[in-house]
Image (cartoon, grey):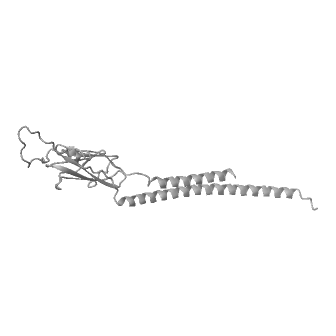
Amino acid sequence: MPLTRRLAAVAAAIGLGLAAVLVTAVPASAHDELLVSDPADGASVQALPEEITLTFSAFPLDEPGATLVEVTDATGADLTSGDPVIDGTDVVQALEGPATGAVSVLWKIVSSDGHPIDGEFTFTVAGGAPSPSASAPAAPPGASAKPTPDDSAAPTVAVTATPTPADDGGDASSALIWTIVGVVVAALVAAVAYLLISRSRRARRERDLAQARETAAAGGDQRPDQD
């Protein structure tokens, strides 16, 4: 096989391989996720903290309305104060008001790749919780007080980060874009290969034609004189 054809075949193979890599690379990418929270999921605190902090694996999108944090007590009362603040990979939400028992946190952000994600977790405020023995008769003098149940034994809720239905459309759009890019690259490589092969064929035809002319001219010079 001539060198030009080998180069063209190699270029076409490289172009097709690049297109396949670009198409398959996008769906494999993962969305951002919640790494840690303060208070942590399932934690027990003595009093409602002044703020909660959510730390993510990348920088959330800092746009108005893109971030939402809802914090409610066991009765459903809102405990948030103002809007959440994004500080690097942290989302900080100020809190206010009294709280007792379980506190629920629901968060929604737009991750760095443009996809919305959400999750929820709970922690317990132990300091303001009513004592189970408050309505019981007073213990006789010298009797030891019964230990109260450990609030830290409250059931925990696993933090979830589930993409919304919009994720499927975003992945499909990204995959379509990269597919088009791959096809264009492959087409350019194929065009270059075609030009190289055409140039080689044209040069070979010109060379054969020149040889034919030289042969014809030499044959004419060798013809005997008819006079």
Which residue: 78% across, 55% down?
211
Residue 199, percent across and down? 66, 55
With respect to residue 144, does 169 lie above or below? below
Q: In front here: 105 or 193?
A: 105
Res. 184 visible in picture: yes
| Figure quadrant of the C terminus | bottom right
Which residue: 74% across, 55% down?
207
Q: In front here: 115 or 165?
A: 165
Which residue: 57% across, 55% down?
189
Q: Is residue 52 left or right of residue 162?
A: left
Residue 178, percent across and down? 47, 56
Q: Is residue 7 left or right of residue 41?
A: right
Residue 165, percent across and down? 35, 61
Q: Residue furthest right?
A: 227
Residue 220, percent across and down? 86, 58
Q: Quadrant of residue 51?
A: top left
Res. 68 visible in picture: no
